[in-house]
């Protein structure tokens, strides 16, 4: 998966707690995407970020969810006051640029379970 | 919203058989990517097609991009158990804001090749 690192791989949270998912993109990639996947389904776009900027968050719920990609450090997807419906696999992808045909490389995902 | 429909959703075949999976949309994409995802892992990029009518071959896998760049197919010859996985197509298009690009994923075809 070309070096995209996500942690933790598995995360268990009780309802009402906060979940923080981290993504370190491939070295040299300045574009990060977050996707959510439910069992036996495809990936649903959540948010697209460049360094220090949210470019498109149209796929992310307006409440409880936030994302950042600081100048230094990994991208963070934060889910506050988690509910059972937040249980899913969350994937991060990175790319070098966003021209036509740009290829994105995925991490191994974080599997969030809300109990 | 640009939608990608993949068919069939599930496919179970015997080793040695040939198969084709389809990825269709009413929207035009500037490029289209195929990924394979194994359980517990992130999607791995197989190929990117950019030009309408383009055909790319990767060993026993043949990918085709429709002339109108709205659909694509993946043909596997003499399938092997190692081909088992979730095959996802993703179209490259502008985000809702029109300011950037994103990948829109289909729901996937779950392929099982039985020995």
Image: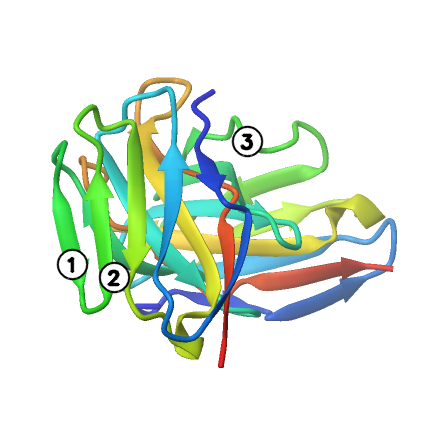
- Quadrant of the image for the N terminus of chain A? bottom left
Frontmost residue, B13 versus A25 = B13
Position of B109 compared to B103: left or right?
right
What is the x, y in percent for residue B54? 12, 41
For mark 3, does the 10 Å Cα neighbourhood hold few (<14), some (14 to 19), or many (20 or more) residues? some
Secondary structure of the residue carrying tag 1 is: strand
Mark nearer the viewer, 3 or 2: 2
Same-subunit check for callouts 2 and 1: yes
> Do we see residue A73 in this rendering?
no
Position of A21 compared to A11: left or right?
left
Q: CA distance from mark 3 to mark 2?
A: 32 Å
Secondary structure of the residue carrying tag 2 is: strand
Frontmost residue, B14 versus A103 = B14
Chain of the residue under the numbered disc 3 shown in the image: A
For mark 2, does the 10 Å Cα neighbourhood hold few (<14), some (14 to 19), or many (20 or more) residues? some
Same-subunit check for callouts 3 and 2: no
In percent of the image, x 49 and y 46: which residue is there?
Answer: A34
Q: What number is the disc on residue A59?
A: 3
Q: Which residue is mark 2?
A: B61
Q: CA distance from mark 2 to mark 1?
A: 6 Å
- Quadrant of the image for the C terminus of chain A? bottom right
Q: What number is the disc on residue A8?
A: none
Q: CA distance from mark 3 to mark 1?
A: 33 Å
Labels 2 & 1 near each other (Cβ < 8 A)? yes
What is the x, y in percent for residue B99? 31, 21
In percent of the image, x 87 and y 52: which residue is there?
Answer: A15
Chain of the residue under the numbered disc 1 shown in the image: B
Labels 3 & 2 near each other (Cβ < 8 A)? no
Position of B82 compared to A63: left or right?
left
Chain of the residue under the numbered disc 2 shown in the image: B
Q: Which residue is mark 1?
A: B57
What is the x, y in percent for residue A43? 52, 46
């Amino acid at each position: 998966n070309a070096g995209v690192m996500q942690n933790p791989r598995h995360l268990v949270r009780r309802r009402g707690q906060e979940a923080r998912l981290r993504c370190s993109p491939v070295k040299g990639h300045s574009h990060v995407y977050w996707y959510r996947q439910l069992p036996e389904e495809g990936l649903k776009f959540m948010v697209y970020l460049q360094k220090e900027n949210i470019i498109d968050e149209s796929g992310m719920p307006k409440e409880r969810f936030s994302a950042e990609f600081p100048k230094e450090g990994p991208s963070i997807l934060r889910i506050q006051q988690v509910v059972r419906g937040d249980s899913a696999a969350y994937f991060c992808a990175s790319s070098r640029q966003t021209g036509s045909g740009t290829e994105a490389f995925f991490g191994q995902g974080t599997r969030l379970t809300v109990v | 919203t640009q939608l990608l429909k993949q068919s069939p959703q599930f496919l179970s075949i015997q080793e040695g058989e040939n198969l084709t999976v389809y990825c269709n949309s009413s929207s035009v994409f500037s490029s289209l990517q195929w990924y394979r995802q194994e359980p517990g892992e992130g999607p791995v990029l197989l190929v990117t097609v950019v030009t309408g009518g383009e055909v790319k071959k990767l060993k026993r896998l043949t990918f085709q991009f429709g002339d109108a760049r709205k659909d694509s197919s993946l043909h596997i010859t003499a399938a092997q158990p190692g081909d088992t996985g979730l095959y996802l197509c993703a179209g490259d298009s502008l985000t809702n804001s029109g300011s950037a690009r994103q990948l829109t994923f289909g729901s996937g075809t779950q392929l099982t090749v039985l020995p």
